[in-house]
Image (spheres, rainbow, N blue to C red):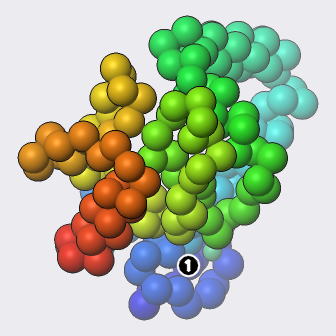
Amino acid sequence: MKTCFKCGTEKSLSEFYKHPQMKDGLLGKCKKCTRADAEQRRLLKTQTDAGWVDKEKHRQRKKNKAMNHEHPLVATARRAVRALGRSKDFHWHHWSYNKNHHTDVIQLSPMEHRKAHRFLVYDQEHFQYRRCDTMELLDTRERHEAFIRNMIETQED
Ligand SMILES: [Zn+2]
Ligand SMILES: [Zn+2]
């Protein structure tokens, strides 16, 4: 447990971002406060720095364009799941980016999701993932889900 210097709340260590320069390797304020501060800074910037706003808009547009160009299916698939609803508590994970599978998604907690992707390699030709160890193509939802659930359960963080 560690106490956040900002909100004064005692929280578990997983509630703090890593920070190598700090004595205990963690930031002094909790994730919630860190995010709130970042949002605050953003807001201030948007109100006071017109140049920054323009640059930021441009950067976002460029990023979206690049993504659409490289992975048109990924962009469409992301748009498709938006209709399923969004939450901070879970993510929709695509086992396949093929058109028929755009909303055939697997619900994972953000932590599980991050972990799952550590063991997956995207195959640009099949629009599906391979196991990072055997490079086997996970070409059915069953195979894909069994693999990631197993990794999530058995692998260390
Ligand atoms: Zn805090
Ligand atoms: Zn995913």
Q: Nearer the viewer, residue 142 or 155?
A: 142
Q: Is residue 34 above or below residue 12?
A: above
Residue 32 seen in the figure: no
Q: Quadrant of ligand 1?
A: bottom right
Identify which residue is drawn at 59% across, 58% down: 91
Q: Quick one: label 1, few (<14), some, or many (20+) residues within 10 Å? A: some
According to the picture, the residue beneath numbered tag 1 turns out to be 4
Q: Is residue 111 above or below residue 102?
A: below
Give left or right: position of 112 versus 47.
left
Q: Position of residue 107 (x, y in %)?
A: 57, 63
Q: Report the side of 34 relative to 39 (left or right).
A: left
Instruction: Using the rendered image of the protein, determine whether residue 69 is visible from the camera's viewpoint.
Output: yes
In terms of image quadrants, where is residue 54?
top right
Q: Position of residue 49 (x, y in %)?
A: 81, 21
Residue at image location 53% in from the left, 59% down from the top: 106
Determine the residue located farthest toward the right in the rendered image: 47
Which amino acid, mark 1?
Cys
Mark 1 lies on a secondary structure that is: loop
Residue 5 in the image: state x and y as whole percent. Answer: 57, 76
Residue labelled 1 has its Cβ within 8 Å of some atom of ligand 1:
yes
Q: Quadrant of residue 129?
A: top left
Q: Quarter-wise, where is residue 51 in the image?
A: top right
**Looking at the image, which residue is at 64% across and 18% down?**
64
Which residue occupies 25% across, 52% down? 119
